[in-house]
Amino acid sequence: MKLDRSLRLRELLYRLRTEGGSPARVAAAVGVGVFIGCSPFWGFHLLICLVVARILGLNRILTALASHISFPGFSLILIGVEVQIARRLRGAPLLSIHSFRADDLWRLVWWKHFGGDLMVGSLVVGPILALAAAWPTYRIALRRSREPKRNALIEEAAYRYLGTGLLNWELVRGKLRYDPVYFSLLRGGALPDAGRLLDLGCGRGILFSLVLAARAQAARGVYPAAWPPPPLHLTFTGIERNAKTAEVARQALGAEAHIEVGDLGDLGDLGDLDMAVLPAADAVVLLDVLHYLPAATQETLLTRAAAVLPPGGLLLIRDADAAGGWRFTATRIQERLSALARRHWRQHFHYRSRSEWRRLLETLGLEVTDAPMAAGTPYANVLVTGRK
């Protein structure tokens, strides 16, 4: 019963999060929320947002979030500007800064003297700030909406994770939306149609979920005809070090993927999983994994990954290019901050340049190509493909 209630709550939050999704409605939700946040009805902003958004068919969560423009600290500035504008409009002298002491704001006498000015000023400042927030929001939302089929595929792939928690769902949505590697692998035809896809360091299994969603769309006849057909006969095996993350992948993917817990940095025997002998695969993928491993471990792991490939098999690596200039610096900063956020205080990284990644795969007897893989991001990522 508790599980049913939890799932129903997640479904409700999902509907609230995704309602009113057209660019115009998204922009309107932000604009309306900002306008309400500028009004002097403190304590009632949330209620007003929910009622107005429901009437206008806007996203209620987005409207409520936008109303927080009147957050503590900025609200004092907002009140001062609104009152001063109203006084200017009616020809009254401007107030000194001492008239806006925080301990006076809620006194009845203050409201009696300045409440009318505050209301008039909010009707001037509110629309200006609402338009200033709504216009860039509209442009961003419009840019997203230009690929409706891609967006539909993202939503279908991410929906699998709703049952594991809204945070996982949001993370997967964001990763698919902003990280170019997943759609590059899918749309570029890099993955084989049949055999086993082995993802080393698979995380939540996002690549598997995207391929499965594409496969489902193809079966329904709604997959984009201009794209290469998705792999229809691949099986999926993932290895993930973090047991909790692996469990998320298992719950989201169910029986459609096999997820093991294993540390790629430990190439010995891990109980049921022997990292010394990786499972045979037609394509092996390592996305943003290798730089966490020491140089010798990188080489050993890639040697074993190449060994399990058949002739024509693919080894696909996305990692940082240490010769990437300022973009590589941005990559290093982001990785260090991420490690600190995970409380991995002593995390070490080993990066290689694009040419070093190429040479390493060539020494394994692979035919190598590479391509930038950081579109839309400030990072120095590169996709290196080795064919056996």
Image (cartoon, rainbow, N blue to C red):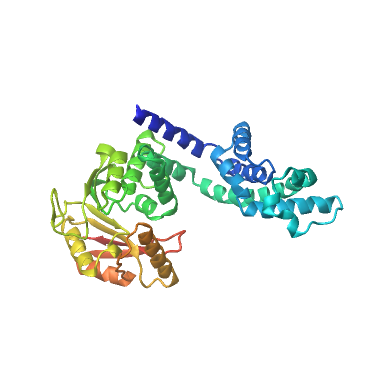
**Quadrant in the picture for the N terminus:** top left
Q: Residue at x 68, y 55 (%)?
A: 77
The location of residue 374, given as percent across then percent down, is 41, 61
Among all residues in the image, which is located at the extreme top?
A: 1
* On-image quarter of the C terminus: bottom left
Question: Which percent across, then down, holds residue 226?
Answer: 42, 46
Task: Please give the name of the residue rendered at 36% of the width and 64% of the height, measured from the top-left corner.
Answer: 382
Please say whether residue 320 is visible from this viewpoint: yes
Task: Tell me residue 118's x, y (percent).
Answer: 75, 46
Q: In which quarter of the image is residue 251?
A: top left
On the question of residue 21 being in view, the answer is no
Q: Residue at left 76%, top 48%? A: 121
Instruction: Tell me where residue 309 appears, x and y as whole percent.
Output: 18, 56
Residue 49 vs residue 142, the one in the foreground: 49
Q: Which residue ends up furthest to the right in the rendered image?
A: 91
- Closer to us: 169 or 144: 169
Q: Does residue 225 lie above or below 262 as drawn?
A: above
Q: Quadrant of residue 346?
A: bottom left
